[in-house]
Image (tube, helix red, strand yellow):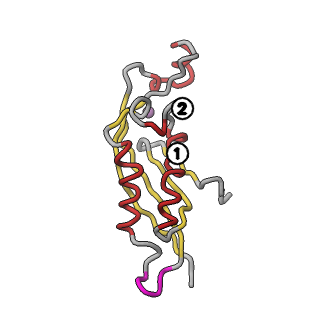
């Protein structure tokens, strides 16, 4: 049986800022630019979660995309949508709310539930703006 990669897309919006309390305002502006804006800014995020597996002889599915959607909604969209990533999200507390750090935390939240549902998480792509996105492979870099 051949391995197939399937991807589910979901969206959420959230506010954040990139700012270190232990740096001066000037240093934060120099490093983070407009993203350090004191009174926050928001993004419409799009997340693509890719799972691999062999299609089931019974269903033809790698895993049920409804199950994958439910996991992403419960573990990612519910806790992040319409939230301030710096202030409102327990699993992001104490870290810079960069898209890179968010994607790592999201991986750790959804990997196990996806495995229980019969899939193997291989990639998360998190799109922050039209021009910027990050990809994470859970430490299993394909290149
Ligand atoms: Ni930003």
Question: Which residue is outermost to the left?
Answer: 82
Q: In which quadrant of the rendered image does the C terminus lie?
A: bottom right
Q: Earlier in the sequence, mark 2 or mark 1?
A: 2
In the picture provided, is 81 more to the left or to the right than 95?
left
In the rendered view, tell whether residue 131 sits above or below residue 28.
below
In the structure shown, which secondary structural element does the residue marked by tag 1 occupy? helix
Picture quadrant where residue 63 is located: bottom left
Split into quadrants, the picture shows ligand 1 in the one at: top left
- Asked whether disc 2 touches disc 1, contact meaning CB atoms under 8 Å apart, the reply is yes
In the structure shown, which secondary structural element does the residue marked by tag 2 occupy? loop
Question: Where is residue 120 shown, x and y percent of the image?
Answer: 54, 66
Q: In which quadrant of the rendered image does the N terminus lie?
A: bottom right
**Circle on res. 66:** none
Determine if the magenta segment contains residue 19: no
Location of mark 2 (residue): 95
In the picture provided, is 16 more to the left or to the right than 140?
left
In the rendered view, tell whether residue 135 sits above or below residue 5.
above
Q: Main secondary structure of the magenta part?
A: loop
Question: Where is residue 59 shown, x and y percent of the image?
Answer: 40, 83
Circle 1 Cα neighbour tier, 10 Å, few/some/many (<14 / 14–19 / ≥20) = few
Location of mark 1 (residue): 105
Look at 54% across and 40% down and name the residue there: 101
Look at 59% across and 55% down and name the residue there: 137
Question: Which residue is outermost to the right?
Answer: 143
Look at 38% across and 42% down and name the residue there: 80
In the picture provided, is 60 more to the left or to the right than 25?
left
Q: What range is drawn magenta here?
A: 55-60
Look at 54% across and 21% down and name the residue there: 20
Total count of labels: 2
Question: Which residue is outermost to the bottom?
Answer: 57
């Amino acid at each position: 049986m051949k391995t197939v990669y399937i991807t589910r897309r979901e969206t959420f919006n959230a506010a954040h800022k990139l700012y270190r309390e232990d740096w001066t305002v000037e240093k934060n502006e120099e490093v983070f630019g407009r993203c350090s804006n004191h009174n926050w800014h928001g993004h419409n995020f799009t997340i693509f979660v890719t799972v691999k597996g062999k299609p089931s002889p019974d269903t033809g599915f790698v895993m049920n995309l409804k199950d994958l959607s439910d996991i992403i909604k419960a573990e990612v969209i519910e806790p992040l949508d319409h939230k301030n990533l710096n202030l409102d999200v327990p699993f992001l507390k104490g870290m810079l709310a960069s898209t890179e750090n968010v994607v790592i935390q999201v991986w750790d939240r959804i990997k196990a539930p996806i495995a229980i549902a019969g899939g193997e998480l291989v990639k998360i792509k998190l799109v922050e703006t039209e021009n910027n996105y990050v990809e994470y492979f859970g430490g299993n870099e394909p290149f």
